[in-house]
Amino acid sequence: MGILEVKNVGKRFGGLQALSDVNLSVKENSVHAIIGPNGAGKSTLLNCLVGKLIPDTGSVMFDGQSVLGRAPYEINQMGISRVFQTPEIFGDLTVMENMLIPIFAKRDGAFRMHAIEAVSSETGINEQAEKMLEEMNMVDKRHMNAAALSRGDKRRLEIGMCLSQEPRLLLLDEPTAGMARADTNNTIDLLKQISDERDITIAIIEHDMHVVFSLANRITVLAQGTPLVEDDPENIRGNPKVREAYLGESA
Amino acid sequence: MSKTDVTRRGVLKTGAIAGAGVALPTIFTASSAAAYTNEPTGASVTLGFNVPQTGPYADEGADELRAYQLAVEHLNGGGDGGMMNTFSSKALKGNGILGKKVEFVTGDTQTKSDAARASAKSMIEKDGAVMITGGSSSGVAIAVQGLCQEAGVIFMAGLTHSNDTTGKDKKANGFRHFFNGYMSGAALAPVLKNLYGTDRNAYHLTADYTWGWTQEESIAAATEALGWNTVNKVRTPLAATDFSSYIAPVLNSGADVLVLNHYGGNMVNSLTNAVQFGLRDKVVNGKNFEIVVPLYSRLMAKGAGANVKGIHGSTNWHWSLQDDASKAFVKSFGTKYGFPPSQAAHTVYCQTLLYADAAERAGTFNPCGIAEALEGYEFEGLGNGPTLYRAEDHQCFKDVLVVRGKENPTSEFDLLEVVEVTPAAQVTYAPDHPMFAGGQLGSCNPGA
Amino acid sequence: MLGLNKKDTTLLLVVMALALFAPFILNPFPEGSSLAQMFNAGYPDLMQRFVIYGILVIGFNILFGLTGYLSFGHAAFLGIGSYSAVWVFKLIGMNVIPAILLSMVMAGIFALLIGYISLRRSGIYFSILTLAFAQMSYNLAYSVLGNPASNYNLTNGETGLQLLLDDPRILGVSSVDGSLPVTSFFGLAMRDSYQLEIGSWLFTFNVGYYLCAIIMLISFYISIRIFRSPFGMMLRAVKSNQQRMNYTGLNTKPYLLAAFVISGIYAGLAGGLLSSMDPLAGAERMHWTASGEIVIMAILGGVGTLIGPILGAGFNEYFKNILSKINDDVLHAWLAFLPDGLENFFVGIMHYFVGKGWHLTLGLLFMLVIIFLPGGLVEGGQRLMKWFSRKDKNATETKTTPAE
Amino acid sequence: MDAILLQILNGLDKGSAYALIALGLTLIFGTLGVVNFAHGALFMIGAFCAVTLQRIFKLSFETLDPTQKDFLGNPLKVKTPYVESWFGPEMGAAIIDWSVPLAILFSIPIMLAIGYIMERGLIKHFYKRPHADQILVTFGLAIVLQEIIKAVYGANPIPTPAPEVFRGSFDFGVMLGFDPNAIIYPYWRMVYFAFAAVIIGAVFAFLQFTTFGMVVRAGMADRETVGLLGINIDRRFTIMFGIAAAVAGLAGVMYAPINSPNYHMGMDFLVLSFVVVVVGGMGSLPGAVLAGFMLGILEAFASMNEVKSILPGIDQIIIYLVAIIIILTRPRGLMGRKGVMED
């Protein structure tokens, strides 16, 4: 029984069957990659997992509870954090504030009228944020506006923000899309380190095979809205069906 | 910072903390506490002219300001003296009021009761005005009148036509020279009877706010007393600019007279729309369809242009009157500004003179003294014939003019012609008339 | 001090000093001089307006400045607060405290209802929803709800809701010697003033003003606390990125609604104070142009800054009240030192910008600020400071500071 | 039935004005992404173009007529318009009579120029600024423009009648078999409706069938891509701004006989036309037109006595009420696109 169980999920947009009969099981503490050619339904599937879309059929269970019909913030509170393709951070806020917000959200829940005490007086939370900044190697940038960070720093900040919530499942949507090779490698190292050091499950949607094969210990291949195969990386590499559907095209 | 020094030095120097009071005069001498708000102690006295300088009635306000300046000039002995020469009281000598030179401050009411009160307050609190006058709408007049009552200064209303100003919202410190809705109805009714007969069906369009309601009530009562039938009374939003959807159903209702209880821009638009719909060319119930505008002003007539031709209404005063007083006023205003004065200019000029005269006769600027001098005061020579400032409600009773839009105007000011001068007796009503009931004058408040 | 950091404490102390010494600061010219007639603003009514509109815009800034949601109908809450307070004076008694409390409660309730509906949409759709609610309130208050002949005359229409000699006032008196009783704070009448004469200067200390000033300082203090609190940070986060908020486990709706209600309560408080200083409430307080003026004041001062709202409100009220009272005579007196021809020339030009032309001047000033100082007067001040410090040749820091 | 037909007619006419203003607003918003609060002022300036032309035609020389006296008792100065002395009294009077339709030609270059100056001088500096700043600076401009008009023309409305032949009304009732006078409709309002229809049709045709229009439409959909194609989209957008200003101005010119122009008529229309645009859906031209006519008709219905007696004051709030309902049920208005002006 995996931590995330997707059963028979189908989603239709008008005349387009975006997903059909998707079954997926992500095991706890694994790094599970979902790959597939463009239009295979990767993003639709991801959106079904985080509450942005509600599938027409099937179920999505996280840790034994259904996520369907819940708002994104409720799903996050269940323990799923999401990293976006283009980093979604609070651009007008400082790096430090960016880091504080998820920690507050973790402690205080979806809403708390916490309007009198200053942020700075919450020493515990400030320390946690400091620690996470250290871990992300961004302490010197703490007073910068997040919008002024480089692309790679933004990505690191976003991952740090997600990690600071200590999620059970981290969802990454093409985390290295548009990155230079060096940044990509840094990100791979960071994610490796995270999965090694932490008690965390990572599900990653990725186009870049280099990233996928450096990180994943389980891979699902999606084609035309339905899973083609789910297997270990070594077996995926040699699978002719996958080559035909995907690798050939992307090479 | 040196602010604390100023305080300390000041306290050491004078040790003065003057007594409590709402107001602070322009020229404050360290004399004893004043007997009434803004008691003038120097060589001059300040009046506050609070008129709409922005907003839709700005032109009317501008004309009022011209008349005020003329009145101040005359009071201080300048110019040709205008109506001071024809006024029945000879207390004014052209040396200011009670020997003090008249100065004035101006403010903008914006035709909003809030802004008008703020402006009046600044005149009272900052400039030491001992009397506030002006206004071009009833809501503003009532609001400012209430303020003056509380602050302890006299309010001489400008153009305000609602029954409420001297009816349920009357105040001991407030006085109105202008006529009102009831008087319009009472003056118009006999004329309408002569012109259109007693068998008529009237359709009322009424601006949906205080003045409109009292005007509608007054004119409907007056015409119903003639035997007219009121077909319908329809309220139109104040903000309406296009009245087509209110005017279109009029003809089909069986009405043969349309009464437009509108003022200012509302009236200009509703009358223009009504004429556009060709109402005046129609024959209903075998009679020519007619339009009546109970309250006319020259500026409205100017705005409506040719559409006013042949349409009847009432007005407080008109420059074409041929009595000595009116001629004197028109001459002195016309010479100074190059065009004849409006009724708004006339009423505020009269109000200023009446106030000054009352102060002279009372020998004081104390509002209670002035109120006493004005209450029950009978005078003439201000263009409206013999006039009474009634003590019970502080309303002037005088002749009312019924006017008609002129068919062949000779100039841009020659838009109305006087059809009839309805004598004061015909428009007088009992102080406890139901349309005016519900309020109390209270007692005069000298402030301080 | 008071749980604030050093910078905020300084700011609070500066505002406190400005408020307490306003009667001196605003009356820089001696009584009777032509400059005094033009520029002095130290009379009770205007000083009260400064701080009351300050409160209003401080509250508006909590919504607009922090969350970026532009309410174009905020004047409705000001109006609701004003009407509530006058009703208390009519029915209960003349003490201002219950009136102010009720106006805050009523404005809060309406803000909750209007906010709950309007916050279902964002951007211009939110603005139009709030505008529509405010315009409906205004139109109804002006006509149907204000007809003395009807059974539901809540607002007394165009004239405005005012006190009458025969109002019940169950905990007070209906009238005093034929006059209306005055509003008071436990016996201390709002209109009482003390005057201090120093040479030819005259300073007025008004009870009502100081009550408003103290309440404004409290409101300002609360707004600093909100800005610095986690709640305030969350509101800024909403403005910055709602998507990230949602995926960080935060529900943006209650945050927005709380901000909306708080700023509505501030507006209600301002309305209650307006009525307490001058017990008459008119419908035009709710007109869309009044809402627009709130936005203008906020932007003039500097959106999202702490001190901006106070500067913006002061700037707007000052020019509105001062410019509209200047007439040609005043100009002539002021420019009398010039040779006649020049004097007439200047008066002829300035004629179009004062008195009846004050709208034009304010409109132009307003455009200039928006065009050249997007951050409002606060940005103007910062630029001046920068310019001075650059002159001192010790300006090295270029880092972006978070909004004050 | 006749009452309903009557109000539909009235509504179409009210709607024509709303639709024309909303159309111009949407053109500006859709092409430039700018929320123009000065658009009402452009409408007002259009109306004052009619006033100005009328004044020009009425420019007169004065002759003293000793047989008549003016108000001060001096000989009356009789004014004779130059056009009457140049073209003879009849022709001159006819020219003055036709000043409003002639003002259409007069106003187009003026409005295009004003639009051009506004866009180049002010608006273009605000493309990158937040919508709130755009709203506020154009609002400031609207105040300045209306105050300038007030300083020149005064606050009082100025009558600008339609030509004599268009005065009076047409009786549709008789035509449709109802009682006489049941459905009457002024000729000039019919002209206005037809005029609005022609303008709306022309704008749509222009955008649909000309290359210029196609480029602009493409730019409305995706500005960056069109820019990448090497097309100077900015210049075209400037022209579009001028056209939108001209549409507002023409709406104003033709509106002048319906209501005497005054300096604040722009502000009177501003809020309503914004509501129309938003109800139609930000950036949607058909939406703006549809919403304009729809709200006009609803407003006319709400002013019927039968309706008002059940719901007192409904005519005061109907537009806002409908706007609230539509925005809540159709999040992007009637025909709006996703993601426009939602942040």
Image (cartoon, rainbow, N blue to C red):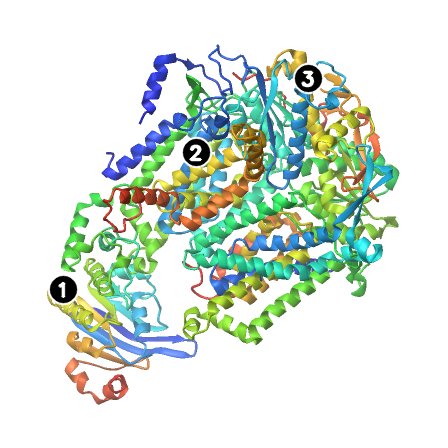
Amino acid residing under circle 2: Phe
Label annotation for residue B94: 3
Label annotation for residue D87: none
Query: Which chain does the numbered disc 2 sit on?
Result: C
Residue D90 lies, with reference to residue C346, above or below; the image says below
Residue C135 lies, with reference to residue C212, above or below; the image says below
Q: Residues within 10 Å of mark 2 (few under 14, many from 20)?
A: many
- At numbered mark 1, what does the secondary structure look like: helix, strand or loop? loop
In three-dimensional space, the C-alpha distance between marks 1 and 3, rounded to whole angstroms, equals: 99 Å
Any part of residue B443 in sight: no
Amino acid residing under circle 1: Asp
Amino acid residing under circle 3: Gly
Label annotation for residue C50: 2
Nearer the observer, A18 or C369: C369
Query: Which chain does the numbered disc 3 sit on?
Result: B
- At numbered mark 2, what does the secondary structure look like: helix, strand or loop? helix
Residue at the spot 68% in from the left edge and 38% down from the top edge? B212
Say if labels 2 and 1 share a chain.
Answer: no
Q: Quadrant of the C terminus of chain C?
A: top left
